[in-house]
Image (cartoon, helix red, strand yellow):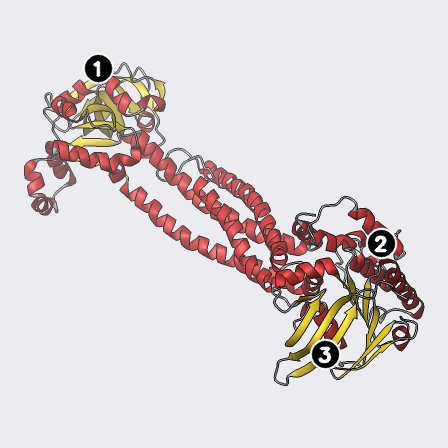
Amino acid sequence: MRFYELFIAFKYLKANLRQSIIITIAITIGVALIIWIPSINLSFFGDLIDKSVSSAPNITITKELDTFKRNKSSFDLFFADRTLLLKDQVQTRKRNIKSYKQIMNQVKHVEQIEAMAPFVSEQGFIIKAAEERGAQVRGIIPELETKVVDIEKDIIRGGIKNLGINDIVIGVTLAEKLNAEVGDRVTVTGPRGISRNLKVIGIISTGLRSKDEFQVYVSLKSGQQVFDLGNDVNGIGIKIKDIYEANKVAAELREITGLNVDSWMEDNKQILDQINRFKLIIVFINFLIIFSAASSITSVFIMLIASKAKEIGILKSMGAKNHSVMAIFIIQALFLSLLAYVLGIICAKLLLMWYASLIAQAGETFLTSEVPVFRISPQYAVLAFFYSTVTSILASVIPSYQAAKLNPVEAINA
Amino acid sequence: MHSGAEKTLIKMENINKIYKGVQPVHALKDINLTIRKGEFLTIVGPSGSGKSTMMHVLGLLDTPTSGKLHYIGQETSKWNEKQKAEFRNKEIGFIFQAHLLLPEFTALENVLMPYYISRKTNSKMKDRAKEILMLVGLSDKLYSKPPQLSGGQNQRVAIARALMNNPSVVFADEPTGALDQQTSADIYNLFRKINSEENMTFIIVTHERNLAQKADRIIEIVDGKIIRDEIMSSYN
């Protein structure tokens, strides 16, 4: 028999079923927890990021007023005790870009850029009959904007492609609050009191509370009229090829244009920071899980090997070499860890399904109006694989080594 | 009696074994001994005289503190654990007082174990294991596990296992100590049969005078020293 260690290892596994089950359960719990906890949070934050990224440009070029830039600290001091509205008005003034076509020409050679679209974006009011709601009004050129942000995937009724000067597309929650439907007419009013009566041609649902309740789209021309911007825009939205290069591309664009450039990563810094903080906590939790599982594996193996001392002595008297004796026990640990890994993945999946059903009963989370899809995080599934195999091998190596080093005479007389 | 008993199989030269500890024990003192191939030899002596230590040193299970041990002309003190393990697997069979079988494995698997450890692949070896089990009278217990067998049956499985790899020498430490008189006699006869048919060397450690007297050569140890090395009259 070429690999008699396998033969003996599996016999021992079967004969010592209780110990085998204890070890398998210990590792299974570890694997399930290592995958489950991060998967919930990463699914949740990942969903939030996906929704945020897919419903806004990857990069936005805006313009800050020179005086504001120079005197930012004195502005802050000056507005510290003023109303929010007044501060907003100053910030509104700072955003106008007159020569957006020239800027678009200036940056179009940047390799990462896939699409660009100018926009106006201001706060305004949407009025229908007696209902009046605050909203973020975004004036766009639909054929350009839809290349930068995939708004069409979020359209649940009507459309956005044919957004004309007299049309508006509104968020689903806002539509409910205004009791507005496709075909209805609403009035949009800017901060300077300029109003336009527009026809609802589409309803969007992004799953993000901030968008669905406050976002409306009008044509660029309408936006410029309502906000009294003439031919100016507030900014240029950009879609890039690799979204994780956003900060790098933003820096390049800042260099070229000298304007204010924000990336989605900077805009979602809080969420990304939260993910990083969470990953740090997970490292600590995982360490505790691994430590407790490893201790249980080691103690079970020490007991198992102590009970097998005589048999180890017999095997050695028959010519079994030290590495073979070690292999017999490590094979057992490895097999149990692989079995426990598969069981752990199944448990993690079941736990995720259970958690998703709990969330589904609530129907929404505090940041999203839809229940995220909870998936097993591949990176933590890989980590759990290494955890289960490496931990169990390491935990079994010391007792196995001791077994291998047993003096056959002492073992036989034990 | 034995035509093949002329070649030197084992040679012990000034072998000492001292167990270190608070009170060191000098278990073997300047042992000089030559054992020829095909001998049927017993080592006798009172408890604690060093006869088991001698068997462990001879069987390469334990290392002497000083002196030289030769096997078929080769000096073994420089052998590493791996070489010793390989030699034990190929050339030595052990039978212990307590049968020391692996309880999870069947009688057949226990007998095959030394062959498995050799990593050889020979489809005929299973038949050989069955034949040996038949020789020891256990052809109907091939698939029984040690806990299902009696003491005598288990000891016979252990004997079959010691013979499996066709070793040059079989060491038996009190092989019939736990058995009744009839079973002891049967086992002794079995050893004798194999010794004469296969020219296999048998070194049996025992304190049973009856069994010892039946050997071709008796070595008596007292307090770690050989005090008697007698070739019996029936042995040529």
Q: Share a chain, discs 1 and 3?
A: no
Task: State the residue at coordinates (52%, 56%).
Answer: A394
- Label 3 sits on a secondary structure element that is strand
**A119 or B22, which lies in front?**
B22
Residue B135 position in % (x across, y down): 88, 55
- Amino acid marked by disc 3: Ile
Q: Quadrant of residue A346 in the image?
A: top right
Marks 1 and 3 sit apart, C-alpha to C-alpha, by: 114 Å
* Residue B155, numbered circle: none
- Give the percent coordinates (x, y) of residue A217: 25, 23
Q: Answer few, some or many: residues within 10 Å of disc 2's Cα (few below 14, many 20 plus, some between 14 and 19).
A: many
Q: Gap between marks 2 and 3, in whole Å?
A: 35 Å
Residue bearing mark 1: A166
Q: Which residue is mark 2?
A: B132
Tell me the residue that label 3 is attached to.
Answer: B31
Q: Is residue B59 left or right of residue A155?
A: right
How many numbered marks have been drawn onto this rendered protein structure?
3
Of the pair A367 and A31, the residue shown nearer to us: A31
Chain name for mark 3: B
Image quadrant of residue A92?
top left
Q: Residue furthest right?
A: B182
- The residue drawn where x is 83% and y is 57% is B148
Separation of residues labelled 2 and 1 (CA atoms): 101 Å
Q: Are marks 2 and 3 on the same chain?
A: yes
The mark closer to the camera, 2 or 3, is: 3
Type of the residue with mark 1:
Asn
Whether residue A153 sits left or right of residue A253 in the image: it is right
